[in-house]
Image: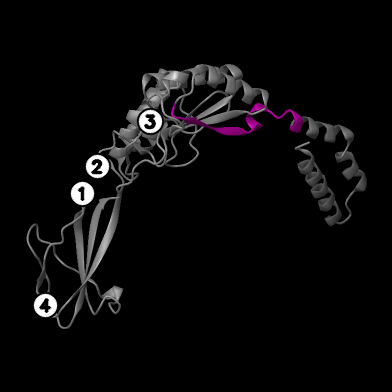
Amino acid sequence: MCGAPLLAATLLTVSGSARRRPGADKAGLQSRLTDAGITEVQRRFADPPADSRIMMRWWWFGPSATREELDAEMRHMKEGGIGGFEVAVVYPLAVDDPARGFRNYSYLGFEFLDRLAFTSRRARELGLRMDLTIGSGWSYGGPYITPELAATRLRSERREIAPDVVSIERPAPFEHDRLIAAFIAPGSVQEADPAAFREVAIPETGRIPLPPRCGPHVVLLYFSGQTGQIVKRAAIGAEGYVLDHYSREAIETHLREAGDKMLAATASRCMRATGPGICSTSSGSGAGTISARCCRLRISAPATARRRSAATTAER
């Protein structure tokens, strides 16, 4: 009966449209609402096409799932009328317990990739669509993301300077921070006009000289550095820094270390993209989201992308 409200709303909309049209043909309206037409709508709600069935987000905690558990859950999804799923791998729910035969295995390790390959094959056999998140936890990252590839931020410091101060000590930055710019403007922190700030040259070493001026001034310092973000709710083996989403090298590293391995395990093809920065793979019937190979093509130079795309087509 889940389709009944939608069916009723559809009929009311059609009826309302007919009333609003001058000279609506009542007989024509009745012909569109024949028993046969209503029966067809009801049939489609009762047994929708495969590509119109709902998909579920399938959390793999640990990861720790066995082939038997995965097979049982996919059969339940199929029997329940679900059209497919998205695999999302996150943190473990329990520690290893040899007495109960329970054990977590490492993300991207042999056992995980074996379970992923099994799920991909079984999904095809059952006619289920499969999407796969290329990463674990939030946001993308892992043990292969070095400090140089990690997410960065821009922070600032404001300092009030007395009229007789001709230079300031170079500030001691936080770990991995780098002083990238300095500006000065007349007045206090509360009074300084943003439009009045002028850039100050920063020497390679030593104190930072200030230009001649009258009255108190404000110095504004900008630092570039790491956010220090760690992947949240990561699976075992997926812990590490969050990658810098603006760094091609960081994205390439993530796709190589995570995407390529999972893509190979699922033997999936390059599907259409649903949006920039979203990288996952799809198997089974219907359109899926972008694969690791597709993501790599999108962030490469246009000429390189065309060459790789042509090579990919030739391989198929």
Q: What is the crowding at mark 4: few (fewer than 14 residues within 10 Å), some, or many (at least 20)? A: few
Q: Residue at x 67, y 23 (%)?
A: 79
Q: Nearer the viewer, mark 1 or mark 4?
A: 1
Q: Are marks 1 and 3 in contact (CB under 8 Å)?
A: no
Quarter of image, res 143? top left
Horizontal side of 118 relative to 303 (left or right) equals right
Q: Residue at x 26, y 62 (%)?
A: 156
- The amino acid on which the numbered mark 3 sits, given as a three-letter code, is Ile
Q: Which residue is mark 1?
A: 176
Q: Residue at x 88, y 44 (%)?
A: 29
Q: What is the crowding at mark 2: few (fewer than 14 residues within 10 Å), some, or many (at least 20)? A: some
User: Which circle's residue, 4 or 3, is located before the other in the chain?
Assistant: 4
Q: Is residue 61 magenta?
A: yes
User: Which circle's residue, 1 or 4, is located before the other in the chain?
Assistant: 1
Q: Are marks 2 and 1 in contact (CB under 8 Å)?
A: yes
Distance CA(mark 1)–CA(mark 3): 27 Å
- The amino acid on which the numbered mark 1 sits, given as a three-letter code, is His
Helix, strand or loop status at disc 4: loop
Tag on residue 147?
2
Quarter of image, res 51? top right
Q: Which residue is mark 4?
A: 212
Horizontal side of 268 relative to 11 (left or right) equals left
Q: Position of residue 155 (x, y in %)?
A: 28, 59
Distance CA(mark 3)–CA(mark 2): 20 Å
Horizontal side of 137 relative to 69 (left or right) equals left
Q: Are marks 1 and 4 in contact (CB under 8 Å)?
A: no
Distance CA(mark 1)–CA(mark 4): 32 Å
Q: Which residues are magenta?
A: 45-63
Q: Which residue is mark 3?
A: 236
